[in-house]
Image (tube, helix red, strand yellow):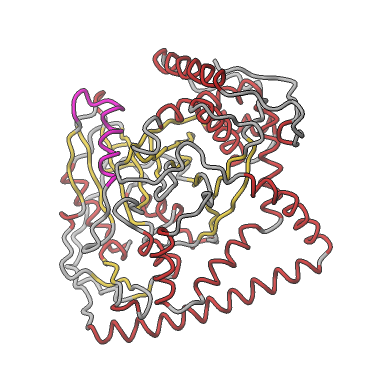
C-alpha cells in the first residue's frame, strides 16, 4: 500500500486563504486548457489516478481546529474517491469560445467543497473543430501560481505517447485523533508564531541596515518619491464594487515573440510590457464608463514569488506582493512603457515587496486565534478607498508542448481569484511560445469585462506598431469590428467628460505627448 502522508500544518499564508474565503469570494486558482482533440475521459481519469502519489495534497483535506487554537492542518482523506474530483461536461451548441467561457464562468463561481481535498477537474467535450478542453481548479491554500503550474505539469505528459498506467498499491490514509490534532495544532501554532517573530525581527534589521547604507538609502529615496503617486492611486475604478458570487471569464492570447520584439525595441521586462498594455486598456475602460483619467493612477498589485530552485515543485504559497501606481493619462504607448519600467524598477530596488513581507511576518507572529480573527473580520471593514484596484499575476509556464493522454494542449488561460471590492483580476501565463491572458470578473461589478479584454488586444497592437514590430497576432474581421465599435464608444464617452482645468499643475505623468497612436 501507499505510505500515508500524515498530518502537516498549513503556513500562515496558506491558512489566510482559508479564513478569507466566502461564498461571494471563492479563493481558488484555475485555468482553462484547450487541446487539439477530445480528451478521453476514462483514460484521463486513469492517468491522474496513477499520478496522485506525486501530489500528496490531492488526497488531503484542510482541517481547522476547534476555537482556532492552532493553524489548520492537512490530513489524509479517509474517504478519498477520485470520482468526486474529476467530472465530465458537455458544451452547449455550437461549442464555440463563447459557450466555453460561459461554462468556465459558472464553474469558477462556486466554492470548492471543504469536506474533500480542495481541487477538481472538469473534462469538457462538445467543442467545435474537434477540440477538447479541461478546466482545472485548486484552492489557493493548496498552491500559488507557480506551484499550481508545476502541479499541472505533473498531471500532464511531456510526450504524446500514451503511457500505460501501472497499477499503484491501494492508498491507506493515516488516522487522526481529536486529541492528537489539538495538540499538534497548538504546537505548530506556537512554532509558527515564533518563526514569524524571527522573520519580523530579521526584516526590521535589514531595513535598518538599508537606511545606513548610502546606495540602498538612495534606492529608498526613489520609493519615497513615488509615495504621492501610490497615495493618489486609490480612487475606485468602475469595477471596484462589492462582489456577489457570479463570475464571468474571458481570455485572449499573444505571440510571445511579438512581446519580446517590443521589449527589445523599447526596453523593459516582459512583465513591464504586460503592465503597460493593461494600463492602457484600463484607461480606455475608465473612459468608456464616462470617467476622466487625467492625473489618475491605477494601483496594480503583482504577486512576487519567493521560491528558489526546486522549491517551485512544492505545494503551498511562497509569495509576497509588489504594489505599483501607474499613470492612466499617458497616450504614447512607448512613453507609457518607459514610465512603467521606471516605476517597477524603483519599486523592486527599494525592496517594496520586502516591506509587504514585513507586514505578513507581523501577522504571522500573532497567536493563531488572533490570525484567524483578523483575516475573518478584515473583509467586513469598510474602507473609504480600496487598498488596491486590481491584481495582475504573471507566471511562466512550460516552454514546450504538454499532453493529456495523447492530446496536445494548444492553449491554457489562467485565472486569479477576485472578491470583496476587487471586481476584476488579470492572470497571465506563458506556454509554448505564446502568452495567454485570462480575465475574471464579477458579473455585477464588471458585466462588460469582454470589452476590457478587447481593449487589451487593441493596446498590444498599438504597442507593437509603436515598436515597429511588423508581425503581430492576426485577428478575425469580427474581432476587428468589435474593437472598432468599442473605440467608438470610448470616443463618445470621452466627449461627455469635462476637460481638465487649464491652470491645473502638470505632473510628470501628464506631460504633453508628442505622438498619439490611435487604435485600429
On the question of residue 161 being in view, the answer is: no
Q: Give the prevailing secondary structure in the magenta stretch.
A: helix
Could you tell me residue 253's position as x and y percent?
45, 31
The image shows residue 306, relative to residue 204, as above or below, that is above
Left or right: where 1 falls relative to 154: left
Q: Which residues are magenta?
A: 92-109
Could you tell me residue 108's position as x and y percent?
30, 45
Nearer to us in this view, 453 or 144: 453
The residue lying at 71 percent from left, 20 percent from top is 515
The image shows residue 169, relative to residue 276, as above or below, that is below
Left or right: where 102 falls relative to 438: left
Could you tell me residue 388's position as x and y percent?
53, 49
Nearer to us in this view, 222 or 155: 222
Q: Quadrant of the N terminus?
A: bottom left
The image shows residue 105, relative to residue 364, as above or below, that is above
Nearer to us in this view, 138 or 339: 339
Residue furthest right in the image: 214
- Is residue 100 rendered magenta in the image? yes
How many numbered marks have been drawn onto this rendered protein structure? 0
The residue lying at 23 percent from left, 26 percent from top is 95
Could you tell me residue 362's position as x and y percent?
55, 72
On the question of residue 369 being in view, the answer is: yes
Q: Quadrant of the C terminus?
A: top right
- Is residue 516 rendered magenta in the image? no
Query: Where is residue 133, by image quadrant?
Result: top left
Query: Where is residue 467, by image quadrant?
Result: top right
Left or right: where 417 falls relative to 114: right
Amino acid at each position: 500500500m501507499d505510505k500515508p502522508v500524515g498530518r502537516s500544518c498549513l503556513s500562515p499564508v496558506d491558512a489566510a486563504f482559508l479564513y478569507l474565503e466566502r461564498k461571494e469570494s471563492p479563493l481558488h486558482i484555475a485555468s482553462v486548457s484547450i487541446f487539439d482533440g477530445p480528451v478521453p475521459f476514462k483514460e484521463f481519469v486513469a492517468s491522474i489516478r496513477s499520478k496522485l502519489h506525486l501530489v500528496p495534497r490531492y488526497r488531503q483535506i484542510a482541517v481547522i481546529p476547534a476555537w482556532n487554537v492552532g493553524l489548520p492542518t492537512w490530513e489524509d482523506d479517509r474517504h478519498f474517491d477520485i470520482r468526486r474530483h474529476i467530472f465530465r461536461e458537455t458544451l452547449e451548441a455550437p461549442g464555440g469560445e463563447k459557450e466555453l467561457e460561459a461554462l468556465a464562468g459558472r464553474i469558477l463561481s462556486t466554492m470548492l467543497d471543504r469536506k474533500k481535498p480542495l481541487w477538481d477537474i472538469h473534462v469538457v467535450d462538445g467543442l467545435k473543430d474537434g477540440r477538447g478542453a479541461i478546466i482545472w481548479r485548486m484552492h489557493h491554500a493548496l498552491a500559488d501560481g507557480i506551484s499550481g503550474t508545476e502541479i499541472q505539469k505533473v498531471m500532464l505528459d511531456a510526450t504524446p505517447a500514451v503511457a500505460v498506467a501501472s497499477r499503484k498499491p491501494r492508498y491507506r490514509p493515516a488516522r487522526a485523533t481529536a486529541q492528537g490534532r489539538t495538540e499538534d495544532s497548538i504546537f505548530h501554532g506556537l512554532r509558527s508564531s515564533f518563526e514569524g517573530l524571527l522573520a519580523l525581527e530579521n526584516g526590521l534589521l535589514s531595513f535598518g541596515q538599508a537606511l545606513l547604507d548610502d546606495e540602498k538609502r538612495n534606492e529608498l529615496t526613489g520609493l519615497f518619491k513615488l509615495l504621492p503617486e501610490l497615495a493618489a492611486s486609490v480612487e475606485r475604478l468602475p469595477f471596484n464594487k462589492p462582489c456577489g458570487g457570479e463570475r464571468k471569464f474571458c481570455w485572449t492570447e499573444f505571440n510571445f515573440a511579438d512581446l519580446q520584439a517590443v521589449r527589445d525595441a523599447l526596453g523593459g521586462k516582459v512583465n513591464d510590457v504586460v503592465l503597460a498594455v493593461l494600463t492602457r486598456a484600463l484607461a480606455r475602460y475608465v473612459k468608456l464608463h464616462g470617467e476622466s483619467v487625467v492625473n489618475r493612477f491605477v494601483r496594480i498589485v503583482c504577486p512576487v514569488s519567493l521560491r528558489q530552485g526546486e522549491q517551485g515543485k512544492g505545494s503551498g504559497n511562497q509569495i509576497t506582493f509588489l504594489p505599483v501606481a501607474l499613470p492612466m493619462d499617458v497616450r504614447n504607448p512607448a512613453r507609457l512603457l518607459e514610465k512603467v519600467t521606471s516605476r517597477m524598477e524603483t519599486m523592486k530596488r527599494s525592496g517594496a515587496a520586502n516591506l509587504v513581507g514585513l507586514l505578513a511576518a507581523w501577522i504571522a507572529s500573532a497567536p493563531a486565534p488572533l490570525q484567524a480573527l483578523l483575516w475573518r473580520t478584515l473583509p467586513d471593514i469598510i474602507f473609504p478607498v480600496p487598498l488596491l484596484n486590481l491584481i495582475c499575476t504573471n507566471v511562466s509556464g512550460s516552454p514546450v508542448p504538454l499532453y493529456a493522454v495523447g492530446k496536445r494542449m494548444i492553449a491554457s488561460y489562467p485565472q486569479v481569484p477576485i472578491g470583496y471590492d476587487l471586481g476584476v483580476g488579470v492572470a497571465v501565463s506563458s506556454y509554448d511560445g505564446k502568452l495567454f491572458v485570462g480575465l475574471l470578473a464579477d458579473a455585477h461589478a464588471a458585466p462588460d469585462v469582454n470589452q476590457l479584454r478587447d481593449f487589451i488586444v487593441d493596446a498590444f497592437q498599438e504597442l507593437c506598431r509603436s515598436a515597429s514590430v511588423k508581425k503581430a497576432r492576426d485577428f478575425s474581421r469580427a474581432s476587428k469590428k468589435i474593437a472598432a465599435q468599442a473605440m467608438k464608444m470610448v470616443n463618445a464617452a470621452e466627449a461627455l467628460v469635462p476637460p481638465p482645468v487649464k491652470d491645473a499643475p502638470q505632473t510628470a505623468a501628464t506631460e504633453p505627448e508628442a505622438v498619439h497612436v490611435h487604435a485600429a
